[in-house]
Amino acid sequence: MELDHGFDFEDCFPSMIARLGAEGFIGELCNGFRLLMDVNMGLITFESLKVSTYLLGLEVRDDELLCMLMEGDLDGDGALNQMEFCILMFRLSPSLMDMQGNVDQVHASVI
């Protein structure tokens, strides 16, 4: 299912890595995860994502939210843990794969 909310996506991850370094970038991804997660479960759930999109003023249908979760849910539990979220963010960044050296540095920071 393709999502279209009437705005263009600008991939800022490469410039963030250039400015923050690999460890700083991973720290920012983790901050983003914490903003979206259910604080009691430590996971991004359907409910926490729905609340976050509402608070951000985005109108996203339930089926679109479920699709977002399914895209990154590697262990099949219906939610995203921090590692799944970081992997999904990398997969959604079209420019990161063109920066293989930086990706290797970031990958080493995650492990």
Image: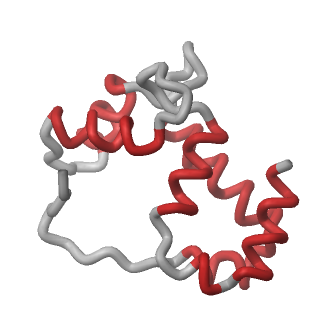
Q: Is residue 79 left or right of residue 65?
A: right
Residue depicted at 56% across the width and 15% down the height: 41
Residue depicted at 72% across the width and 84% down the height: 18
Q: Find residue 36 and report its horizontal and vertical position in percent.
A: 47, 38
Residue depicted at 46% across the width and 42% down the height: 72
The relative height of residue 19 versus residue 22 in the rendered view (above or below) is below
Q: Is residue 18 left or right of residue 60?
A: right
Identify the coloring: secondary structure
Q: Residue furthest top?
A: 40
Q: Quadrant of residue 25?
A: bottom right
Q: Quadrant of residue 3?
A: bottom left
Q: Find residue 5 and report its horizontal and vertical position in percent.
A: 15, 62
Q: Quadrant of residue 43?
A: top right
Q: Is residue 83 left or right of residue 8?
A: right
Residue depicted at 21% across the width and 49% down the height: 57
The relative height of residue 93 versus residue 89 in the rendered view (above or below) is below
In depth, the one of 39 and 17 nearer the eye is 17
Q: Find residue 42 and report its horizontal and vertical position in percent.
A: 60, 23
